[in-house]
Amino acid sequence: VERTFSIVKPDAVRRDLIGTIYQRFEAAGLKVVAAKMLHLDQAKAEGFYAEHEGREFYEPLVKFMTSGPIMVQVLEGENAIAKNREIMGKTNFEEAAPGTIRADFASSVRENCVHGSDSPESASREINYFFTPDEVC
Ligand code: ATP
Ligand code: MG
């Protein structure tokens, strides 16, 4: 089985969508094996999105991601990385398939409710960025 890293972003927490989104994970066979609520500071958010530094959406993205609490979680299941990307839908909610989290709940390209790792390398880097080994059984 594979593990991936996921975030319920501040827009979704504000709109009381934590439970709804966790239900989507579990219904898709993605087991929540570690989770916590955090409020990112600027340095932590900048570090997480370092790959996008310099792009026009980077600064507003960091501002958005520090605008309120988030949920971070590790999801486990068969092909967890691809499966999670599939149920999230495309980055741009207007292009996301019907029934995906972003198609159903995102309010803009930036405020798109969820993050999910895009490769085994990012999954492992992102899990270690937010969780200590003893928090992930
Ligand atoms: P994530 O990394 O959050 O899972 P993703 O891999 O689908 O999403 P990325 O290209 O890595 O998308 O962009 C990271 C995040 O930056 C997006 O989820 C979105 O919140 C924001 N973002 C990306 N492109 C844009 C854009 N053109 N305008 C505004 N925000 C954007
Ligand atoms: Mg990404």
Image: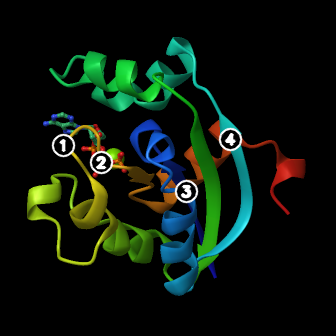
Separation (CA) of disc 1 from disc 2: 6 Å
Q: Nearer the viewer, mark 4 or mark 3?
A: 3
Position in image of residue 18 (x %, y %): 55, 56
Quadrant into which the N terminus falls: bottom right
Dividing the image into 4 quarters, which one contains the C terminus?
A: bottom right
Q: Looking at the image, in which quadrant does ligand 1 appear?
A: top left
Nearer the observer, disc 3 or disc 2? 3
Circle nearer the N terminus (2, 4): 4
Q: Amino acid at mark 3?
A: Ile
The residue carrying mark 2 is: 112
Q: Is mark 1 within 8 Å of ligand 1?
A: yes
Q: Which residue is mark 4?
A: 37
Question: CB of residue at label 2: within 8 Å of ligand 1?
Answer: yes
Q: CA distance from mark 2 to mark 4?
A: 18 Å
Q: Is residue 24 above or below residue 102?
A: below
**Element under label 1?**
loop
Q: Marks 1 and 4: in contact by CB < 8 Å? A: no
Q: Which residue is mark 3?
A: 18
